Image (cartoon, helix red, strand yellow):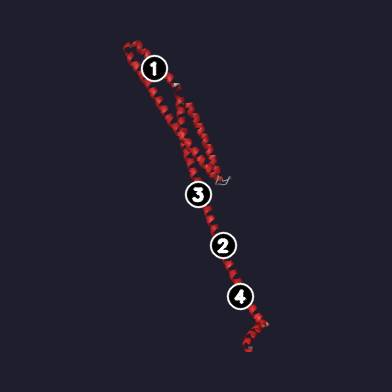
């Protein structure tokens, strides 16, 4: 009985001894430290992974921002080209209408003189040569027909330039609409946008001047 209980007694005494307790606590402490170290390492890895992910995200956002800025820059350049083409067309209309205006003003004195000369010649022919009356009448009809043809041609030309002016004006409105949409994406003080606005204002003034000139000619 004593022999059987001896191992139990010795084990109890061993567990109860300070040396065993210290050794046991030390092992637990080491084990705990290892667990803590593993957790810290895992946390560090997570933090590093998180930082890398954030860096990648920032790079992507920066790349996206640069891409958007380049797209806006390209769009502004495209609108500037469109406005330059509109300016060329408006200058063509202006030049044509000025030419029409000059032609309208120049012949004012000449036809009266020519008409007077024609009347004198016709009267002389009627007095001196009665048989030539039919020929004179034919010549008058030819002159009238020629004038009518000239007027019809002028009107046709004016209609053509009016159509071109209307078309160009509509193109200018379309560019203005594109600019309004683009304005929401660029800075309010963007120098390129301000330059485009000034160009549009100048072109609108040209459109109005040409409309006024057309009304005078019609």
Residue 36: quadrant of the picture: bottom right
Vertical position of residue 37 compared to residue 215: above or below? below
Judge depth for marks 2 and 4 and give the one in front. 4
Q: Residues within 10 Å of mark 4 (few under 14, many from 20)?
A: few
Real-space Cα separation, disc 2 to disc 4, in angstroms: 28 Å
**Mark with earlier residue (1, 2):** 2
Q: How crowded is mark 1: few (under 14 residues within 10 Å), some or many (20 or more)?
A: some
Vertical position of residue 188 compared to residue 66: above or below? above
Vertical position of residue 7 compared to residue 169: above or below? below
**Mark with earlier residue (4, 3):** 4
Residue picked out by circle 2: 50
Asked which secondary structure carries label 3, the reply is helix
Judge depth for marks 4 and 3 and give the one in front. 4
Q: Which residue is drawn at 55% across and 64% down?
A: 49
Q: Is residue 24 left or right of residue 122?
A: right
Asked which secondary structure carries label 1, the reply is helix
Q: Is residue 34 left or right of residue 100?
A: right
Residue picked out by circle 1: 118
Nearer to me, 130 or 218: 218
Q: In which quarter of the image is the N terminus?
A: bottom right
**Mark with earlier residue (3, 2):** 2
Residue picked out by circle 3: 71
Real-space Cα separation, disc 1 to disc 3, in angstroms: 70 Å
Residue that lies at the very extreme toward the front in this rendered image: 1
């Amino acid at each position: 009985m004593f022999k059987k209980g001896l191992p139990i007694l010795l084990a109890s005494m061993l567990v109860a001894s300070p040396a065993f307790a210290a050794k046991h606590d030390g092992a637990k402490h080491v084990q705990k430290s290892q667990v803590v170290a593993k957790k810290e390492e895992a946390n560090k890895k997570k933090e590093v992974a998180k930082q890398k992910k954030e860096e990648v995200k920032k790079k992507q956002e920066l790349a996206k921002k640069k891409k958007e800025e380049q797209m806006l820059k390209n769009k502004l350049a495209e609108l500037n080209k469109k406005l330059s083409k509109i300016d060329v067309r408006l200058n063509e209309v202006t030049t044509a209408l000025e030419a029409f205006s000059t032609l309208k003003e120049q012949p004012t004195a000449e036809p009266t003189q020519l008409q007077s000369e024609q009347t004198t010649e016709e009267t002389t022919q009627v007095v001196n040569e009665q048989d030539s009356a039919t020929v004179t009448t034919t010549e008058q009809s030819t002159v009238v027909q020629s004038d009518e043809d000239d007027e019809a041609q002028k009107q046709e030309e004016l209609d053509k330039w009016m159509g071109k002016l209307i078309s160009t004006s509509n193109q200018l409105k379309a560019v203005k609409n594109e600019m309004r949409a683009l304005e929401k994406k660029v800075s309010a003080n963007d120098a390129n946008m301000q330059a485009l606005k000034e160009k549009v204002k100048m072109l609108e003034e040209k459109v109005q001047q040409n409309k006024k000139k057309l009304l005078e000619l019609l």
